[in-house]
Amino acid sequence: SNQQKTEANILLLGAENVGKSALTVRFLTRRFIGEYGDIESIYSHSDKIDGREISFNIWDSLYPQDSETAESVTEKQLHWSDGVILVYSICDRSSFEVVRQQVQLIRQSKKGSGGAPIIIVGNKRDLQHQRAVSGEEGRLLAMSTDCSFFETSAAENYHGVLLVFHELLELIRDARALK
Ligand code: GDP
Ligand code: MG
C-alpha cells in the first residue's frame, strides 16, 4: 500500500570535532554558536520541502573515544536511520579516512540501511588556508560509493547547510516512493 512512514530518521556520523553538532544546530536554529560540548542528542523537527510537510529526527552522534576506527558505526544506528550524513573536516585528513571507513561499513551492511541515501560532507570550508583534503578527493569518494557530496561551512554559510539536509530528505522521500 502507499501507507508511508511519515518520519525520516537522519544519522550524522564522522570523527570528533568535524562539526556534526555545528551542522545540526545550524540547520535547526540557523545559528552558529561556536561550542557544542560532547553531547549526543536526537532532535525532532518538521519542515516543508516543495510545499510538502515532512517530520524528521536527527541523531547527532558521538564518535567513541576508545575506538580508532569506524567500527563505531553500530548496527543499532544503521537500523534506526533512513539516511546518513557522513561528515569530515576539510582541514583534517584523518577525519576523511574515518568517513572512508564508515561509508564502506554502511554499504557492506546487510541489515538496516546498507542501501540508504548517504551524503558525504566536507565541512569547515571557510578554513581554506588549512585545507588538507581537496574537493576532488571528496567527490571521487562519493562517486565510487554512490553518495552525494557537498562541502559546507557551518560557521559561515547557512544556505549550504540547508541544502545538505534538504537533499537528504528528498532522497529519503524518493527512496520510499519507489518501494
Ligand atoms: P562534532 O564533534 O563533530 O560535533 O564537532 P562540533 O560541532 O562540536 O565542532 C567542533 C569545533 O569545530 C567547534 O569549535 C566548532 O565551533 C568548530 N566548527 C564546526 N563547524 C565549523 C565550520 O564550518 N567552520 C569553522 N571554522 N569551525 C567549525
Ligand atoms: Mg558533537
Image (spheres, grey):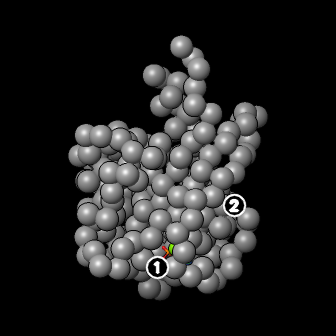
Outermost residue toward the top in this view: 1
Mark 2: amino acid = Leu
**Depth order, front residue of 27/135:** 27
Q: Tell me where residue 77 appears, x and y as whole percent.
A: 40, 53
| 101 horizontally vs 166: left or right | left
- Above or below, 3 relative to 55: above
Left or right relative to 142: residue 83: right
Of the pair 50 and 178, the residue shown nearer to us: 178
Helix, strand or loop at mark 2: helix
Residue under label 2 = 28
Tell me the quarter of the image containing the N terminus: top right
Can residue 149 be seen at all in this image of the molecule?
no
Give the quadrant of the C terminus: top left
Mark 2–mark 1 distance (CA, rounded to whole Å): 19 Å
Q: Is mark 1 within 8 Å of ligand 1?
A: yes
Q: Are discs 2 and 1 less than 8 Å apart at CB?
A: no
Q: Which residue is mark 1?
A: 17
Label 1 secondary element: loop
Quadrant hosting ligand 1: bottom right
Please provide percent x and percent y for residue 95.
35, 74
* Residue pictured at 48% horizontal, 31% vertical: 175
Question: In the rendered view, would you say 130 is above or below 30?
Answer: below
| N-term mark: 2 or 1 | 1
Q: Position of residue 58 (x, y in %)?
A: 57, 55
Q: Residues within 10 Å of mark 2 (few under 14, many from 20)?
A: some
Q: Residues within 10 Å of mark 1 (few under 14, many from 20)?
A: some
- Please give the name of the residue rendered at 57% of the width and 42% of the height, measured from the top-left corner: 8
- Residue 82, percent across and down? 47, 42
Report if residue 96 is visible in the image.
yes
